[in-house]
Image (spheres, rainbow, N blue to C red):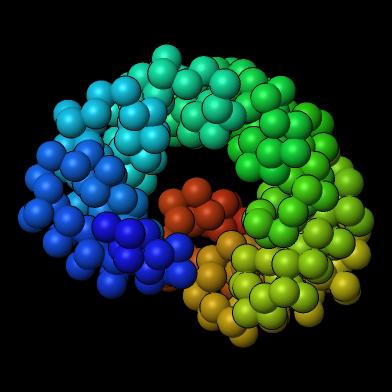
């Protein structure tokens, strides 16, 4: 058991798993062996096998809040937020001052579309641990999901300021900035994403859109081109480039992109919009 914990601490859950199996064969009533084996499965990206181990740990030691919370996370990542919610409720009853439990329950509420309760839980987590970057991040996600970008932006900023664990906060803050017309700030955030991942087609497209919305179509076009260089059939980038072409008066190029969107047929709403745009475009000689 001790060697398994050491291996897991060194980032080797697969080898730790072997030791936990041995510990369970020797002491089948040892709750912590099941618990740590469940953690190892979770670290290996296998929540399906983690859940029964957490359940067994709970049956052997019902007052173990970590078993409920980790089963809750495994259920959440398995696509079962309702079951996750019940586990986080139980964990909070056992340990009401542990901020990670409220953050986890907030994730479950968000997945169920209950953003008000998600925000309340993230706020509670922050009150218990003011430097909890994850709670700011997920509260920002909940605010953005409600369309409240004014509240989301400072939360994403706080998550960024507190630590590097949430690079996605830059992209989400960028999208929120676009929604409220802060296009330069959005372009800067997507620039950070691109600097750290020069193959992020979505980030190039989003910066393209920020420039386009700011009236900088000439500056937007290279980002659309780069996005499509990385992902040639990325329909959102095709749509962005088509609209940039329209703004630049390049009607034939815009028609080509709108027709490509229709050929791909992968996004019904963009398909509909492309058809509408094509019906309005009149090329010379038509």
Residue 45 position within the rendered picture, expressed as x and y whole percent measured from the top left: 33, 60
Indicate left or right for 243 with 62 as reference.
Answer: right
**In this orientation, does residue 169 appear?**
yes
Nearer to the camera, 204 or 64: 64
Q: Residue at 33%, 44% (x, y): give it.
A: 74
Residue 256 position within the rendered picture, expressed as x and y whole percent measured from the top left: 59, 76
Which corner quadrant of the image does residue 131 belong to?
top right
Residue 142 position within the rendered picture, expressed as x and y whole percent measured from the top left: 61, 31
Q: Residue at 14%, 52% (x, y): give it.
A: 24
Indicate left or right for 238 with 245 as reference.
Answer: left
Indicate left or right for 31 with 254 as reference.
Answer: left
Q: Residue at 54%, 78% (x, y): give it.
A: 231
The total number of labels drawn is 0
Q: Is residue 43 above or below residue 260?
A: above
Q: Is residue 53 above or below residue 21?
A: above
Q: Quadrant of the N terminus?
A: bottom left
Residue 83 position within the rendered picture, expressed as x and y whole percent measured from the top left: 29, 28
Q: Quadrant of the C terminus?
A: bottom right
Q: Is residue 202 above or below residue 38?
A: below
Indicate left or right for 34 with 270 as reference.
Answer: left
**In this orientation, does residue 55 appear?**
no
Nearer to the camera, 166 or 3: 3
Nearer to the camera, 245 or 279: 245
Which corner quadrant of the image does residue 149 belong to?
top right
């Amino acid at each position: 058991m001790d060697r398994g914990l050491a291996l897991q601490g060194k980032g080797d859950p697969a080898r730790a798993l072997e030791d936990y199996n041995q510990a369970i064969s020797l002491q089948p009533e040892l709750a912590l062996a099941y618990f740590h084996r469940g953690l190892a499965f979770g670290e290996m990206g296998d929540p399906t096998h983690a859940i029964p181990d957490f359940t067994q740990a709970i049956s052997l030691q019902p007052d173990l809040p970590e078993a409920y919370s980790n089963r809750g996370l495994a259920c959440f990542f398995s696509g079962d937020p309702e079951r996750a919610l019940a586990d986080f409720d139980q964990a909070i009853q056992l340990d009401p001052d542990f901020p990670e439990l409220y953050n986890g329950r907030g994730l479950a509420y968000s997945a169920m579309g209950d953003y008000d309760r998600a925000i309340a839980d993230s706020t509670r987590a922050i009150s218990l641990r003011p430097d909890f970057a994850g709670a700011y991040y997920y509260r920002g996600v909940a605010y953005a999901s409600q369309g409240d970008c004014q509240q989301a932006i400072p939360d994403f900023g706080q998550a960024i300021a507190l630590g590097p664990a949430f690079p996605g906060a830059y992209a989400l803050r960028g999208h929120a900035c676009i929604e409220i017309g802060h296009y330069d700030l959005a372009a800067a955030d997507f620039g950070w994403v691109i600097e750290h991942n020069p193959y992020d087609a979505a980030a190039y497209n989003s910066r393209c859109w920020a420039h386009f919305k700011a009236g900088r179509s000439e500056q937007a076009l290279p980002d659309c081109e780069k996005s499509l260089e990385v992902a040639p059939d990325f329909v959102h980038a095709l749509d962005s480039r088509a609209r940039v072409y329209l703004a630049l008066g390049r009607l034939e190029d815009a028609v080509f992109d709108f027709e490509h969107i229709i050929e791909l047929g992968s996004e019904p709403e963009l398909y509909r919009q492309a058809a509408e745009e094509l019906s309005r475009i009149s090329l010379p000689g038509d």
